[in-house]
Image (spheres, grey):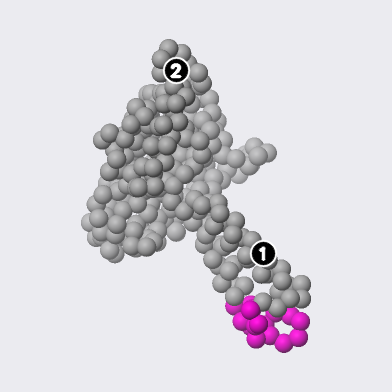
Amino acid sequence: MRPNQGFGYGGSPFWSGLAGGMAGGFIGNLLFGGRAFGGMGYGGGPGLLDLLIIGALIYFLYRFFVRRRGAQSVYYEENRSCPQSGEPYYGGGQQVYHPQTNEVERGLEQIGRSDPSFNTGNFQETAEDLFFRIQAAWMNRSLDGVKDLLTLEMRDYFIGEFERLKQQHIINRLENIAVRKVELSEVWKESGRDFITVLFTANLLDYTVNDTSGEVTDGDKLNPVKFQEFWTFSRGVGENRWQLAGINQSEQPSPN
């Protein structure tokens, strides 16, 4: 799937920018002689209340970025070179992905306490099934048969993308999909819902055609590409119906 950008749960750039700006300004004000919120300190330095607030802000920001970005880190084997951009890449087994095992295990334990019937293997099978069904819907530019597999936010996003594809008279063909790995990268509970982010590693033929002439307008219909995508699934605590809540592309597909 090649939407314009990653999309889904918790992806608001407004709130992430606002939080960072507030924290930076607040801490800077304290460190360079200002007073924030009238803390309990004496003289020109920060007081106890100020330090407690700084600690809370740092913890909040740490959890925010770990949840949204940290679990999606990709590491490389020792003595291997990373691209200068620091982005994930493919080729010759040089890339090694290490999920945050402890965080994932703690999240699975939380889900297991509220749903003793939960089984990781069964969930991975369900996630892979949803992956194929939603990819087919993307290629057909239609939500027929998959509407209930998406959160409301994702439905709106897909509808908008389908309209864009139709206006441009293009179809994104996704053929010969072969999923190589299905890995849990993040698991958590929030606001009465379970969330699990899955890293799919797969290869496929990925190209676009004009929906009138059939002419290839982008991509390659002969040479498969490898790709990785993070798909976040969500459900109400204790429910059995998982829905797609977000997609984040690790990078654009690269040739084999």
Q: Which residues are magenta?
A: 37-52
Asked whether residue 205 appears in the rendered view, the answer is no
The residue type indicated by label 1 comes to: Gly
Q: In what element is the residue under mark 2?
A: strand
Q: Which quadrant of the figure contains the N terminus? A: top left
Residue 45 x %, y %: 74, 80
Q: Left or right of 178: which side holds 239?
A: left
Seen in the picture, residue 99 relative to 46 is either above or below; the reply is above
Asked whether residue 164 appears in the rendered view, the answer is yes
- How far, Cα to Cα, is label 1 from label 2? 48 Å
| Magenta stretch holds residue 103 | no
Residue at 37% x, 24% y is 176
Q: Left or right of 118: which side holds 176?
A: right
Between circles 1 and 2, the one closer to the viewer is 2
Residue occupied by mark 1: 24
Chief SS of the magenta region: loop
Seen in the picture, residue 215 relative to 184 is either above or below; the reply is above
Residue sitting nearer the eye, 159 or 146: 159
Estimate how packed mark 2 is, as few (under 14), some (14 to 19) or many (20 or more) residues with alpha carbons within 10 Å.
some
Residue 188 x %, y %: 40, 58
Residue at 24% x, 52% y is 240
Residue 40 x %, y %: 65, 86
Seen in the picture, residue 210 relative to 84 is either above or below; the reply is above
The residue type indicated by label 2 comes to: Asn
Residue sitting nearer the eye, 174 or 214: 214
Residue occupied by mark 2: 210
Seen in the picture, residue 94 relative to 232 is either above or below; the reply is above
Q: In what element is the residue under mark 1?
A: helix
Q: Quadrant of residue 27?
A: bottom right
